Amino acid sequence: MEGNGGNGGRVYVGNLDKSAKRAKQLVMGKLRMGKAVDWATAFSLWPVHLTTSCCGCEFAATWSPRFDAEQHGALPWVGARQTNMILIEGTVTKKMACAVRVTWEQMPSPKFAIAMGACAIDGGIFYNSYNIVRPWEIIPVDVYIPGCPPRPEAVARAIIELQRKIRKQRVASKWIEEGWRPDREYVKPKEDPCSWWRG
């Protein structure tokens, strides 16, 4: 093949998918980029502001000046597409389950969930109600916070526990390497939580 200068040149074409995979392994493995990704994700938790029940007051108090959860690297945000964490704040009704699932599906990966309050764990005082859905039935939950209502300190502690989980289990860097989280596959709602709305 002749170049502009008259010198013969060669072009090597190989398997681009294989080359990209090797480059990703190099960046995430030998260059230790995975630790930086996990550290950055752990301290960039942006919970979506989705109040499902009365624990929303404690959610607000957690980010108030007195407790200031922003110092832990978490900042609430209003748009689901710009967040990576969801806090289930207490009871989830069948109608609210649709909003939770739609919000979860709109969030970019890797994404995380914290269930706060006795009602989010297993129904709380509404344990035998016909219109209650357990959060772990519609989305995968990483950390549970007991209490009715849980204190803002407990919410901050749950954020710290989630950060430890991200860094210890390499959740974010594994997602970049593998493209998905196998621990999230098992949570598929048995029935469509939005069936009442879709008709």
Image (cartoon, helix red, strand yellow):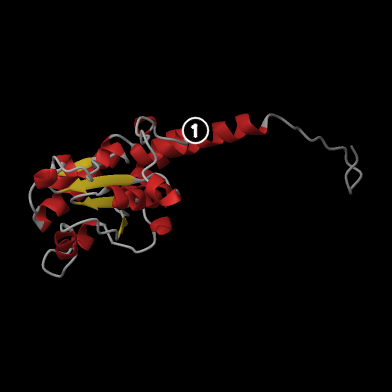
The residue singled out by tag 1 in the image is: 25
- Which amino acid type is marked by label 1? Gln
Give the image location of residue 114, x and y in percent.
23, 46
Give the image location of residue 172, x and y in percent.
37, 41
Query: Please, is residue 30 above or below residue 112 in the view?
Result: above
Residue at 28% of width from left, 45% of height from top?
Answer: 113
Q: Is residue 8 among what the camera can see?
A: yes
- Given residues 169 and 118, the one toward you in this image is 118
Residue at 83% of width from left, 37% of height from top?
Answer: 9
Give the image location of residue 151, x and y in percent.
8, 55
* Label 1 packing within 10 angstroms: few (<14), some (14-19), many (20+): some
Number of numbered discs: 1
Element at label 1: helix
Left or right of 158, for residue 96: right
Q: Quadrant of residue 30?
A: top left
Left or right of 57, for residue 47: right
Q: Is residue 194 among what the camera can see?
A: no
Residue at 16% of width from left, 57% of height from top?
Answer: 55
- Given residues 172 and 81, the one toward you in this image is 81
Give the image location of residue 145, x and y in percent.
14, 45
- Given residues 150 and 100, the one toward you in this image is 100
Query: Please, is residue 171 above or below residue 68 in the view?
Result: above
Left or right of 187, for residue 126: left
Query: Please, is residue 59 above or below residue 178 in the view?
Result: below
Q: Quadrant of residue 80?
A: bottom left
Residue at 89% of width from left, 37% of height from top?
Answer: 1
Query: Please, is residue 174 above or below residue 81 in the view?
Result: above
